[in-house]
Amino acid sequence: MEKTFAELSLDMDIQDIIQELDFRNPTAIQEKVIPAILDGKSVIGQSRTGSGKSHAFLLPMFQQLDENQKKVQFVITAPTRELATQLYNEVRKIITIADKTEKWTAKLLVGGTDKQKAIEKLKTPPMIVVGTPGRILDLVKDGALSIYSAESFVIDEADLMLDLGFIEEVDQLLVRAKQDIQLLVFSATIPQRLQHFFKKYLRNPEYIKMEEHFSPETMEHRLILKKHRDEAKIIWDISKTIHPYLALVFTNGKQQANELAEALGGYGLDVGVIHGGLTPRERKRVLKEIQQLRYQYVVATDLASRGIDIKGVSHVINAQLPKEEHFYIHRVGRTARAGLEGTAVSIYSEEDARLIERLEQKGLTFSFVEVKQGEWTEDKSWNERTRRKTEDTSNDREAWKRVRKAKKVKPGYKKKQKQQQQQIKRQLTKEQNRKKR
């Protein structure tokens, strides 16, 4: 039976905020994390993208906020400016709902903004600091900000923080925090390289891992075999069968993203592109244009599956499948959020068979399809194709064994043997099909 927020030791003021946020019941991660944070425990929370991690730490944090203490009480770090801004916007939303704009103070500290203005605004320390580790560390080193008074320190998307090389800056920040600070680490995956960091700072943390549900029940997963076709042409054919509110199209690299976006634009689709190679100014412009619904298709790298929250995604299209299962999950996790329906369509080739098999073993169900004349049709599955190829090869060998070998070589003997082999092979195939029935 589902728990309610009232059962998680949240006081009435926070429950009123939850009601205004239109949250019905806590998600699985919230149900476990909120009581642990309120008990003062350090937490490692692991669950997939879109599972409600942000409010798992924001709600108890606001309950513990002391409006009479005009000092830094909480520090929230995120690996990208976009993620930090999204978290800050959620903080501001809660402050506005609670009607505490004068009493609860928060500041966003990210790179690409005027540092001098930030220093001026920090003359009165905020209760909540949200930002990227680099900018927060700069301001701490400059003496404009002290985080020693902070009770809790959040590291959001820790694995992405590690991948982008910011974990060292987090390390330097924690050296400047008090030793018994409550550390709240959230991540979709926990790479081995993070373990050393955990051992250094975490004493008996509460490790909360949600079982990996690889897809929401409301999501459909379709696979299209690439064959010898161009990815842009396949997506153009797909576009005639779907009417996305917004489709995220994933590639495995920046160059592929640029090329695909250009090709899709050539077909007349409204296409935007976003990846780590864009400048912060360009990324900000594209995100604004996405919010203004300028594009129906956005070609992206994995930055958008993890580091950016793009709302309203109805379809995810994998122009190229990733190599690892968790990247597939992060990508498709951008749709079917908050109980909405979603569709993921992936273009695959034979070399993706192992990934598909691993995902199927995890409980994912794929439908194998083709697009013909603007309509979806069923197609053979990858393992059926593989089995057919194996049978064909096996039948070729067996047929060749049965071919009568001429004692005397005459002109055209190779052609006759080949014809005989094909005839025997057809007979073997018929016998196999009869047995299957």
Image (tube, rainbow, N blue to C red):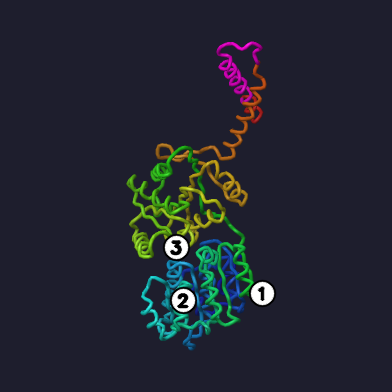
- Tag shown at residue 409: none
Say whether marks 1 and 2 touch (CB < 8 Å): no
> Which of the two labelled residues, at mark 1 and mark 2, occupies the earlier sequence position?
2
Query: Which is nearer the eye, 337 or 399?
Result: 399
In the image, what residue type sits under mark 3? Ile
The answer to whether residue 20 shows anywhere in this view is no
The answer for how far apart the CA atoms under marks 3 and 2 are is 20 Å
In this rendering, the label closer to the viewer, 1 or 2: 2
Q: Position of residue 215 (x, y in %)?
A: 55, 55
The answer for how far apart the CA atoms under marks 3 and 1 are is 32 Å
Q: Name the residue tied to disc 3.
A: 308
In this rendering, the label closer to the viewer, 3 or 2: 2
Highlighted range, magenta: 405-429
- Seen as rendered, the residue at the extreme bottom is 68
Quadrant in the picture for residue 185: bottom right
Q: Name the residue tied to disc 1.
A: 204
Q: Is residue 74 above or below residue 348?
A: below
Viewed as shown, does residue 139 lie left or right of 407?
Answer: left
Q: Name the residue tied to disc 2.
A: 136
The answer to whether residue 327 shows anywhere in this view is yes
Rendered-image quadrant of the C terminus: top right
